[in-house]
């Protein structure tokens, strides 16, 4: 069971990409303003960094740096922010520019998985799915996708999950013991709205999926069945993240109401790579 969501903060035209650092600060993007915002546990909010592009997803590295998926035409890839400076780590693949990255997640070894959807659609399925290794090598895992979006790693690291918004579905890619990634498999469908957006796992393997246009966070069990939902006041729910001292607080971003909400859940969220020293 989950609690009904309560308003955390409002007044941001395009909130997305929530992520917590080790000190409990909540970061999120306000992409129409190119801004990455930081909300402290004391409730103080301020701009942390402005990419000048279209930041969409955030993920912390174990070294404390912040990785950003940015769809802006001057970046259209992955940024690393450290000590107040931003560095582009990936924006081409084999000499061809990426479309524009949207969401990202680290696995336990620091390998970064990210979606690359910008300007892709059902009619123009040019979206890609990649992983960036710590040594800078970039591997394409899939292409021909209709707006690949949210990305989440399974609790035991044996699969990577990708929301394909254009086809209202969530895809699963098995990861073998040697690190090889398998072909796409359909994990779940999310009918209605515009499709799945950002995602996050809890420690029991349940997948929380922001339903853009659907006004909810849908919760899928490990078999791909939707077992619960957190209804949100706005329809355009963009992303979800776990935080709080017990990791049982879910933060939800919604564009329609220009707000962030929180809800309490029974099962804690899966600890992410950047939340351990």
Image: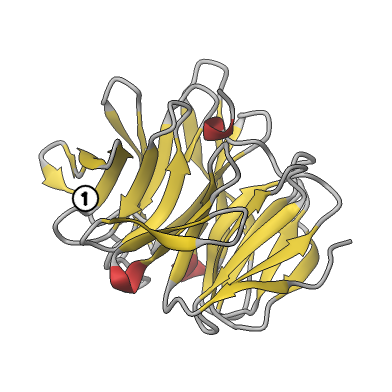
Percent x, y for residue 106? 48, 34
The residue shown at (74%, 60%) is: 219
Residue situated furthest left in the rendering: 95
**Against 188, is 255 above or below?**
below
**Against 234, is 36 above or below?**
above
Q: How crowded is mark 1: few (under 14 residues within 10 Å), some or many (20 or more)?
A: many
Rendered image quadrant of residue 212: bottom right
Rendered image quadrant of residue 91: top left
**Against 87, is 25 above or below?**
below
In the structure shown, which secondary structural element does the residue marked by tag 1 occupy?
A: loop
Percent x, y for residue 201? 67, 46
The residue shown at (14%, 57%) is: 74
Is residue 259 visible in the rendered image? The answer is no
The residue shown at (55%, 25%) is: 108
- Give the colour scheme shown: secondary structure
Q: How many marks?
A: 1
Q: In this view, does 117 lie to the left or right of 226?
A: left
**Against 178, is 115 above or below?**
below
Q: Which of 157 and 87 is in front in this view?
A: 87
Q: Which of 96 and 11 is in front in this view?
A: 11
The residue shown at (15%, 36%) is: 94
Instruction: Report which residue position mark 1 lands on.
Output: 98
Q: Nearer the viewer, residue 176 or 260?
A: 260
In the picture, which quadrant includes the N terminus? bottom right
Is residue 111 visible in the rendered image? The answer is yes
In the picture, which quadrant includes the C terminus? top right
Residue situated furthest top in the rendering: 178
Rendered image quadrant of residue 122: bottom left
């Amino acid at each position: 069971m989950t609690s009904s969501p309560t308003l955390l903060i409002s007044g941001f035209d395009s909130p997305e990409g929530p992520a917590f650092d080790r000190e409990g600060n909540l970061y999120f993007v306000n992409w129409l303003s190119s801004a990455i915002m930081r909300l402290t546990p004391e409730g103080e909010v301020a701009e942390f960094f402005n990419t000048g592009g279209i930041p969409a997803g955030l993920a912390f590295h174990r070294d404390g740096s912040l990785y950003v998926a940015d769809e802006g035409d001057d970046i259209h890839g992955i940024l690393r922010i450290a000590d107040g400076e931003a560095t582009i780590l990936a924006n081409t693949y084999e000499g061809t520019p990426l479309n524009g990255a949207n969401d990202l997640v680290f696995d336990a070894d620091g390998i970064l998985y990210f979606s690359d959807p910008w300007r892709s659609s059902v009619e123009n399925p040019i979206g890609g799915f990649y992983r960036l290794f710590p040594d800078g090598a970039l591997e394409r895992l899939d292409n021909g996708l209709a707006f690949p979006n949210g990305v989440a790693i399974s609790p035991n690291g044996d699969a990577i999950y990708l929301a394909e918004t254009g086809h209202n579905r969530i895809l699963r890619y098995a990861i073998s013991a040697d690190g090889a990634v398998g072909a796409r498999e359909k994990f779940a469908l999310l009918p209605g709205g515009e499709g799945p957006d950002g995602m996050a796992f809890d420690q029991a393997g349940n997948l929380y999926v922001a339903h853009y246009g659907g006004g909810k966070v849908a919760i899928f069990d490990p078999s791909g069945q939707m077992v619960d939902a957190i209804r949100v006041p706005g329809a355009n729910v963009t992303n979800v993240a776990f935080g709080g001292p017990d990791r049982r607080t879910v933060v939800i971003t919604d564009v329609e109401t220009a707000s962030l909400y929180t809800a309490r859940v029974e099962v804690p969220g899966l600890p992410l790579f950047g939340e351990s020293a």
